[in-house]
Amino acid sequence: MRRKIPSTQALLAFEAAAHRGSFTLAGQDLSVSQSAVSHQILGLEQDLDVSLFLRLPRQLVLTDAGRSLLSRVSPALDALEAAMLDLASSKGEGGTLELGVVPTFATKWLIPRMPTFLKAHPHVTLNLSTRLLPFDFSLTGLDAAIHYGRPDWPGTESEYLMGEESVVVCSPALMKKRQLRRPADVLKFTLIHQSTRPHAWRDWLQLAGIDDAQGASTGPKYELFSMIAQAVKAGLGVAVLPRFLVADEIADGTLAVPFDLSLSSDFAYYLVWPTQKASWRPLLQLREWLREQAAP
């Protein structure tokens, strides 16, 4: 689609004349003649069908339309200049990559590893935003996403990062009291659920050989794994959580794993991107780095 945008020369001439109040001085700034500046601005006024300047005997004065245009053109030219300088300084290696990511995955796995990526690729800026479910890339401005699920996202390409095993976690106090001696004992406590994985408890209980568990679907639902981990630490109940997301808490003893029974999932973590971004260099760099970080 052809954009309805005047030439860059016309916009630069307009901005210079607006700041200098003179076609002659604007021409000196741009290293062109006074008549060239006047011609560019006349053409711009004809294209827009509006007067941008009051041409007084010794001065140019912006009209209301001119002031409105200047307030929009100057930031746009500044942004264009910054983009060109950024590209030139990075020699095409950099850019800003907007990444949607599952929140607890970001805080517990991705962000602690990011310094190595940024050190290897200093010209890439990686912006993170929260996404829990698939979305339309064309409506978000995101360049890629780390998605938990299956690689069946329409209009995208994807790369497998890692699978996931979940375990029951409880507070250390419950372990000390020996109140969780066998899997069925979890039903004596409040079962905390993750809102996007409502069947995690049912699946774990079935894995433990408890097929007819009454109350497996009852209990509070929290949106984020980090909330659930805090609730379990506080003694509000027990939960099924991905082991790698609570590995630090298990290691430092603030969460306990009462049973050596891991629940595997058919879902996995994938890096997903729109097909048209497949050859974009910052994305290729992120893919390579994630592949290395997620390797067993």
Image (cartoon, rainbow, N blue to C red):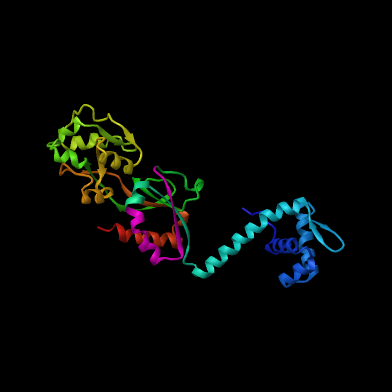
Q: Would residue 142 be visible to someone looking at this image?
A: yes
Q: Position of residue 71 (x, y in %)?
A: 68, 54
Q: Is residue 120 magenta?
A: yes
Where residue 8 sits, quadrant-wise, is: bottom right
Kindly identify the residue that appears in the image at 34 percent across and 56 percent down.
Answer: 112
Q: Is residue 39 magenta?
A: no
Classify 244 as above or below 233. below
Q: Position of residue 210 (x, y in %)?
A: 16, 32
Classify 265 as above or below 119. above
Kindly identify the residue that appears in the image at 24 percent across and 40 percent down.
Answer: 240
Q: What is the magenta range? A: 109-132
Q: Would residue 151 be visible to someone looking at this image?
A: no
Q: Nearer the viewer, residue 267 or 140?
A: 140
Q: Position of residue 89 (x, y in %)?
A: 52, 70
Kindly identify the residue that appears in the image at 53 percent across and 69 percent down.
Answer: 88
Left or right: 291 as drawn, with respect to 138: left
Kindly identify the residue that appears in the image at 32 percent across and 49 percent down.
Answer: 269
Where residue 202 sits, quadrant-wise, is: top left
Left or right: 61 as drawn, with respect to 295: right
Residue that sits furthest to the top in the current view: 214
Residue that sits furthest to the right in the current view: 57
Where residue 150 sits, quadrant-wise, is: top left
